[in-house]
Image: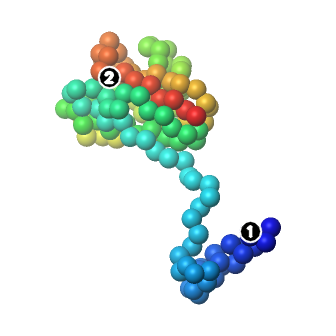
């Protein structure tokens, strides 16, 4: 409890511009915000194909190919593994879009709905 009060005092002092506790900046957050992991789509496929994220994170898909892609969760055509991924949807060349927060611990497959048979455009996201 004393340590918590001491740290709180340091943060208040730092916010007021007073040098305290040997530091002039605020203390780092102990609870990290949700992270975002990037998956890039090119003519060679999706990279990385398999990623692991913390629960609450998002995945950003970026289309660096010259053709449109539609990124959805497995299985094709139901897209029921991870409905949070289905918000990515259609990506024109050069476009990026984030999934919703992936809150449920599980592994989700993803694929390009347009080119669903192309293994290079398939992958998985493990949520821990």
- Work out which residue is located at the far bottom of the displayed protein and give it: 18
| Image quadrant in which the C terminus is located | top right
Callout 2: SS: helix
Mark 1 or mark 2, earlier in chain: 1
Q: Residue at x 53, y 76 (%)?
A: 25
How dense is the environment of label 2, judged by Cα within 10 Å: few (below 14), some, or many (20 and up)?
many
Residue 44: x and y in percent read 22, 26
Residue at 53% x, 42% y is 57
Residue 111 seen from this side? yes
Residue 63: percent from the left, percent from the top? 29, 35
- The residue lying at 43 percent from left, 41 percent from top is 37
- Quadrant location of residue 70? top left
Residue 64, placed above or below residue 26: above
- In the rendered image, the residue lying farthest to the right is 1
Q: Position of residue 84 (x, y in %)?
A: 52, 32
The x and y percentages for residue 122 are 37, 21
Q: Which quadrant, please, contains the N terminus?
A: bottom right
| Mark nearer the viewer, 1 or 2 | 1
On the image, numbered disc 1 is attached to which residue? 4
- Foreground pick, 20 / 90: 20
- Tell me how far mark 1 sits from mark 2, CA to CA: 48 Å
Q: Height in image: 35 above or below 115? A: below
Label at residue 48:
none
Residue at image location 19% in from the left, 32% down from the top: 66
Note whether 81 is above or below 100 in the view shown.
above
Q: Is residue 72 visible?
A: no
The residue pinned by badge 2 equals 121
Left or right: where 50 falls relative to 9 = left
Q: Kindly state the secondary structure of the residue where label 1 is placed.
A: helix
- Left or right, 55 with respect to 87, comes to right
Q: Is residue 37 left or right of residue 6?
A: left
């Amino acid at each position: 409890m004393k340590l918590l009060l001491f740290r709180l005092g340091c943060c208040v002092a730092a916010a007021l511009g007073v040098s305290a506790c040997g530091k002039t900046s605020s203390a780092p957050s102990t609870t990290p915000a949700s992270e975002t992991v990037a998956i890039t789509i090119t003519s060679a496929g999706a990279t990385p194909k398999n990623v692991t994220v913390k629960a609450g994170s998002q995945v950003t898909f970026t289309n660096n190919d010259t053709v449109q892609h539609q990124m959805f969760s497995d299985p094709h055509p139901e897209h029921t593994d991870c409905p949070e991924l289905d918000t990515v949807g259609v990506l024109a060349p050069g476009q990026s879009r984030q999934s919703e927060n992936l809150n449920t611990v599980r592994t989700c497959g993803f694929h390009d709905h347009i080119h669903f048979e192309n293994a290079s455009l398939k992958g998985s996201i493990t949520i821990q």
